Image (tube, rainbow, N blue to C red):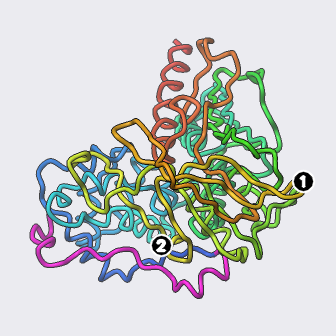
Amino acid sequence: MGNPKGFLLHKRKDVQYRPVCERVKDYKGVVKIRPDRQLRDQASRCMDCGTPFCNWGCPLGNYIPEWNDYIYTGQWKKAFELLDATNNLPEITGRVCPAPCEYACVLGINDDPVTIRENELAIIEHAFKKGWIKPNPPEKRTRKKVAVIGSGPAGLSCAVELNKNGHSVTVYEKDAKIGGILRYGIPDFKLEKKILDRRIAIWEKEGIKVKTNTEVKKDPAGFDAVCWAGGARTPRDLEIEGRNLSGIHFAMDYLSQANKKVSGEKISEKGINTKGKKVVVVGGGDTGSDCVGTANRQGAKCVVQIELLPQPPECRDGSCPWPKYPLLLKTTSSHKEGAERHWSILTKKFVGEKGKVKNLSCIKVEFEGRKMEEIPGSEFEIEADLVILAVGFLKPELPETLSKKNVFCAGDSQRGPSLAVWALYEGRETACEIDNYLRGEEK
């Protein structure tokens, strides 16, 4: 390591954001990239720990200590080469990944962990700025053709790895543009779509074919292998009294429409807009947080976010010792822009007037282990002109052909709803399996 005592000299400095008063007026990215000098100081905190658990915490197995050292010593090209070896979309994970690597950082045992995600983002943006990322089509092509159904992180990483191996890859996407949840589920203030388009343009020049506005429900003909990577978009519902009232929407419907509007895409269905409304977001996860930030930018009168589970601790406790991923209190940039947050709240029913939602009838709950009990006498109501349900996703939608030897699946289609970084990993692993299968067929 260039400076094995860097963690003693420099404290962690958290991500810098654009001012709230400025960023809520637009959908531009909220994160500010640090000057190189500060990045080097933060990278120097990566200690010579011997056993880097950050590698274990990262599904992709990124070479984190090595590229942190290269940042510290100013060897950005080498840092990029290592990052590029394991991650197809570091400009995405560097912005939206919850960074399980940081929670596994050895320094986190008794200090704040290294700013791994921020360093990753700095490397890849440095590489784009320097022009190191250029189309690099394979020198040789095999005679094999592969169809990838779905263009989210799993489908894209699978397609890229197969294309590198010389196979001819066609990606099918039912929406107007490729990107899946990266494009339609994540707001621009977290991930500007020009970042995604920048990378896609390179992949298309490398030979990947894209067919949008094409919904595939069975294995397409004429391919030697098929990878299903359609994700798991089926939302979990709240089947309680009053659910049929107007003004209650699923989070992904809301976010998808908002993203399309920002990008100038046409919206066929009736628009969902929170301007001037009292908005309640049911669900305390990242998707709910994205809804909070979007509602604030649309001019909501007020935003309340409620969560069934208890408020998580701010620091690790006995239930989540290092290096396990801890369920800690997460306050996002969206929360800091304005929102009331409440935990241990069960929604009992929706109350309406003239067919429109007006209130949520709620009660406070407490947990003993996994057992939930309602607290007598704690009933209350929350006013709402519009309700957004962000309570998770259910099973993926798959065809009945996965038993065929040339049909594979990746990402949420295989493991269920999960993180983008896991989808990237699974796409790469599935591409390896497909490549082995296709080369075995050639023998």
Q: Which portion, as a residue range, is magenta?
A: 1-27
Per the picture, the main secondary structure of the magenta-coloured stretch is: loop
| Residue 17 covered by magenta stretch | yes
Residue visible at 32% across and 58% down?
Answer: 313
Where does residue 356 sit, x and y in percent of width and height? 84, 57
| Tag 2 secondary structure | helix
Point out which mark residue 48 bears: none
Q: Marks 2 and 1, how far apart in space?
A: 41 Å
Position of 50 with respect to 155 (left or right) is: left
Occupied quadrant, residue 254: bottom right
Q: Residues within 10 Å of mark 1 (few under 14, many from 20)?
A: few
Residue visible at 30% across and 81% down?
Answer: 38
Q: Residues within 10 Å of mark 2 (few under 14, many from 20)?
A: few
| Residue 263 covered by magenta stretch | no
Q: Amino acid at mark 1?
A: Ser
Marks 2 and 1, the one that precedes in the sequence: 2
Front in this rendered view, residue 173 or 140? 173
> Which residue lies under the disc numbered 2?
130
Position of 272 with respect to 397 (left or right) is: right
